[in-house]
Amino acid sequence: MSFTIEILEEKKNPIIDRMEIKFRIDHFNASTPNRLEVKKKIAAIKNANEKFTIIRNIQTHFGGAYDVGLANIYEEAKELQFYEPFHIQVRNLPKDTRSEVYKLKKRKEPYGHLFDYE
């Protein structure tokens, strides 16, 4: 799938120690790319660690060939785990890992190792 990402706005948040990015995805004649593909491309553009890059949301515009989204790039796992909600962290994992996290959480077993932040 071919798509391009354009950074619309970039803001450094020194209190939380993260970079907040607003971006636009152009995907003419194709569906919206999945979150993991967008995450990899943004991490590559910003030379950031993919593990600490979180896609907050992707807003699809009906009938358009573009989407607008928000991403946060953290410096450390500690801030990421504190400021990002659990469901957003899980959404940024591969599909098979997501289901495993929810299974372990339901059984009240440890699942932190699946996030691989360290």
Image (cartoon, rainbow, N blue to C red):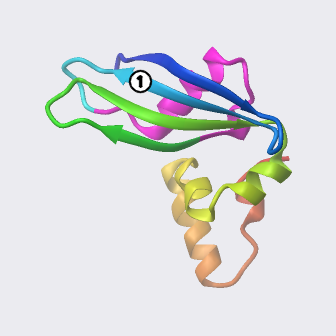
Q: Is residue 89 left or right of residue 111?
A: left
User: Magenta stretch: residue 16 in it?
Assistant: no
Of residues 71 and 27, the one drawn nearer to the viewer in this rendering: 71
Q: Position of residue 65 (x, y in %)?
A: 23, 23
User: What secondary structure predominates along the stretch shown in magenta?
Assistant: helix
Where residue 36 sits: x, y (%)?
Answer: 51, 37
Above or below, 80 relative to 102: above
The quadrant in which residue 30 appears is top left
Q: Residue at x 49, y 20 (%)?
A: 8
User: Horizontal placement of 58 versus 56: left or right?
Assistant: left
Relative image position of residue 96 (x, y in whole percent): 52, 55
38 left or right, relative to 12: left
Quarter of the picture containing the N terminus is top left
In the rendered image, the residue lying farthest to the bottom is 107
Q: Count the numbered circles shown.
A: 1
As drawn, which residue projects farthest toward the left?
Answer: 63
Please give the name of the residue rendered at 45% of the width and 18% of the height, measured from the top-left corner. 5
> Compared with residue 32, is residue 79 higher up or lower down, i.e. above or below?
below
Q: Is residue 8 above or below residue 75?
A: above
Residue 53 magenta-highlighted:
yes
Residue at 74%, 30% (x, y): give it. 49
Helix, strand or loop for disc 1: strand
Give the magenta range: 32-54
Q: Which residue is mark 1?
A: 24
- Percent x, y of residue 46: 67, 18
In the rendered structure, which amino acid carries the disc numbered 1? Arg
Q: Residues within 10 Å of mark 1 (few under 14, many from 20)?
A: some
What residue sits 76% from the left and 63% below the top?
112
